[in-house]
Each structure stands twice: as structure tokens, then as C-alpha cells.
């Protein structure tokens, strides 16, 4: 032990001898402490467009709208892109999506499961504050001329959670005595996003006999197919339009600020027109949960349930 102590004394003396006597010395007061400064990051408000179209189309349609909401409200709002309808709903339930823009079928499921609440809905150029679904087939298909001709055929729909692309057409089929069991196959568009376009492309390619989409989708696929290749076989009844909703627990002041900004959009104003044109919206009006009771009735009519 004595030997080891002697070695450490020697090391210390060597270190002292190695110091440059010309270097200045500094006195350090260890009693003075300063807390580290942590850069504060503003909390962002997440906004998501139900992925009925590809992410690039969703961005093109709503990025001006999101920028407008940021400017108008002063909130740090950013657009995020769920991959699937089911993923969108779950993210609302997990609090990862604060503001949702979705079809009424998805909305009422989010309201039932997670307490989401409608606060505004859109007015479109065609249909006003309502929209509908379409049943399509190839224009040159001689075997499908009426709804009854769809029996025994292969049907591709957008998604089990799609209003115009599944629920509304299914309700129309049921009203004509055609049930799910009457089709040879019911398939849903695969993969993340872009599901409306995929339905049209699959029918155009002859992979399926009929497809169901929301009205307006055929305008989106112009340039990808010859529009003359597709025929609209039938259209559904009108239902309340797409809805803006907030997740459960979101600050009411935030919801009110966004609602006020949305309702202030005026297509007659030059700086507002590009925002609304990109989103294919004419105006935004106030909305409440009861506006979507007709969609709940449609679900009940086909024997569906929200208890999932």
C-alpha cells in the first residue's frame, strides 16, 4: 500500500512539472451553477386527409389549405399521411391526428369508437353539401347494362370504410334485392393510398367487372386512362358531405379557431380561390354530429354495426 501511494505522488509531481509556467491560471468557483437552457419546440397540430387518393394527390389537394390555416390561426398545423383508412381511424384514437378530414362513414366510426366530433363540412361544386357514389364498368362490356346484371360479377370497391366507394353503392344494391352473397367476388383496392384511382384502373384493365367510387374520381384519373373507356352504370343517393372533425380532448379554442378560419374561406376572394380550387371545395359550413344520422341509417339498413 505504501509503495502504491508513493507512485501516485510521483505521477502528480511529474504532471505539475510539465505545466507551462507561462500559461495563465483560472479560478473556478464550483458553487456557482447555471441550469442548461432547453430549446422549446412549439407543439404542432396534426391534420390528415383520409387516404382515398395517393399521398401526392392528398398533398396537392390540401397543402394550400393547411398553409392557410397556419397563417389564419397562428397554430403550427402540419399535414400527415396515414396509409390506410383503418390506420387513419386508429391514429385519431391514439391522439396522433388532431384534425381529420374524412368521409362520413369513417367519421361516424371514429365518433363511436374514439369520441371524435364533427365541427364543419364541405360544400362541393356538384352536390353542394352532399355527395354520392358511382358504380362503374367498362364502356365496351355488353354484359352489364343494369344493376341486376351485376349479379355474379367481380366487384372491386375502394375500402370497407369508404362511403361513396362502398357503403353507399352497397346500400343501393340492397335496395334492388342484391346482397353481398350475390357477387362472385368483392375485393378492395390494395396497398396504401390511391384507392379510388386503383378501382378505376382495375376496371379499365378488365381485372374486375364493376367498381365503386365516389363521384368526382373520374376527373382525377384523366390522363391515366381514356375517360371514354369507363361507363357510369348507376349513382347512389346523396349523403352528407365530407367532414372536418377533431379528436377527443383537443382544446376547444383550437377547434373554434380552425372552424372560424375554414368558414371564412370565400371563393370570390382571389387569394382564397386557389385554396378552394385545389381542394375541390366551394365553401365550408358548420356541422354537428347529428348531420350524419342518415349514414348511420344506411349502415343499419345493410345489417352493419359500429361495435367493432
Image (cartoon, helix red, strand yellow):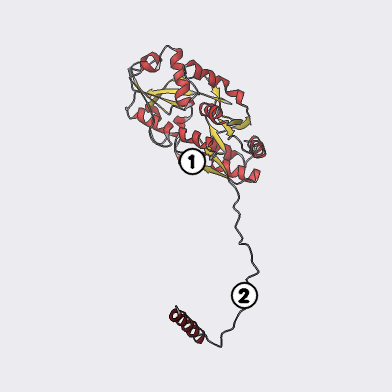
108 or 207, which lies in front? 108
Q: Give the secondary structure at mark 2.
A: loop
- Residue at image x 45%, y 20%? 169
Image spot of residue 62 (x, y percent): 54, 40
- Sequence order check, earlier mark of 1 and 2: 2
Of badges 1 and 2, nearer the viewer stands 2
**192 over 298 or under it: above or below:** below
Tell me: 228 left or right of 264. Answer: left
Residue 120: in sight, yes or no? no
Image mark for residue 107 = none
Question: CB atoms at circles 1 and 2 under 8 Å apart?
Answer: no
**91 over 106 or under it: above or below:** below
Q: Which residue is mark 2?
A: 28
13 or 241, which lies in front? 13
Image spot of residue 256 (x, y percent): 66, 36
The crowd level at tag 1 (other Cα within 10 Å; few <14, some 14-19, many 20+) is: many
Quarter of image, res 54: top left
Image spot of residue 286 (x, y percent): 64, 30
Image mark for residue 81 = 1
Q: Quadrant of the N terminus?
A: bottom left
285 or 125, which lies in front? 285
- What's the CA distance linking mark 1 and mark 2? 53 Å
Quarter of image, res 165: top left
111 or 235, which lies in front? 111
Image spot of residue 280 (x, y percent): 54, 34
Callout count: 2
Amino acid at each position: 500500500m505504501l509503495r502504491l501511494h508513493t507512485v501516485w505522488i510521483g505521477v502528480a509531481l511529474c504532471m505539475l512539472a510539465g505545466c507551462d509556467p507561462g500559461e495563465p491560471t483560472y479560478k473556478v468557483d464550483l458553487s456557482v451553477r447555471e441550469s442548461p437552457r432547453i430549446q422549446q419546440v412549439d407543439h404542432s397540430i396534426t391534420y390528415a386527409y383520409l387516404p382515398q387518393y395517393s399521398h401526392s394527390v392528398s398533398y396537392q389537394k390540401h397543402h394550400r389549405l393547411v398553409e392557410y390555416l397556419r397563417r389564419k390561426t397562428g397554430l403550427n398545423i402540419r399535414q400527415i399521411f396515414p396509409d390506410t383508412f383503418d390506420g387513419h381511424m386508429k391514429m385519431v384514437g391514439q391522439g396522433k391526428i388532431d384534425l381529420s378530414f374524412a368521409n362520413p362513414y369513417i367519421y361516424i366510426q371514429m365518433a363511436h369508437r374514439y369520441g371524435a366530433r364533427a365541427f364543419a363540412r364541405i360544400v362541393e361544386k356538384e352536390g353542394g353539401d352532399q355527395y354520392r357514389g358511382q358504380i362503374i364498368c367498362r364502356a365496351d362490356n355488353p354484359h352489364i347494362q343494369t344493376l341486376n346484371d351485376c349479379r355474379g360479377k367481380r366487384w372491386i370497391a375502394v375500402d370497407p370504410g369508404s362511403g361513396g366507394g362502398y357503403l353507399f353503392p352497397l346500400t343501393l344494391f340492397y335496395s334492388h334485392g342484391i346482397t353481398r352473397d350475390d357477387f362472385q367476388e368483392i375485393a378492395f383496392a390494395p396497398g396504401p393510398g390511391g384507392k379510388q384511382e386503383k378501382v378505376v384502373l382495375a376496371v379499365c384493365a378488365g381485372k374486375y367487372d364493376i367498381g365503386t367510387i365516389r363521384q368526382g374520381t373520374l376527373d382525377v384519373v384523366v390522363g391515366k386512362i381514356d375517360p371514354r373507356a369507363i361507363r357510369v352504370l348507376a349513382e347512389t343517393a346523396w349523403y352528407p358531405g365530407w367532414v372536418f372533425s377533431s379528436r377527443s380532448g383537443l382544446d376547444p379554442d383550437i377547434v373554434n379557431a380552425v372552424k372560424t378560419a375554414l368558414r371564412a374561406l370565400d371563393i370570390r376572394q382571389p387569394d382564397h380561390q386557389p385554396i378552394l380550387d385545389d381542394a375541390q371545395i366551394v365553401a365550408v359550413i358548420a356541422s354537428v354530429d347529428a348531420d350524419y344520422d342518415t349514414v348511420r341509417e344506411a349502415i343499419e339498413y345493410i345489417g352493419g354495426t359500429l361495435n367493432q
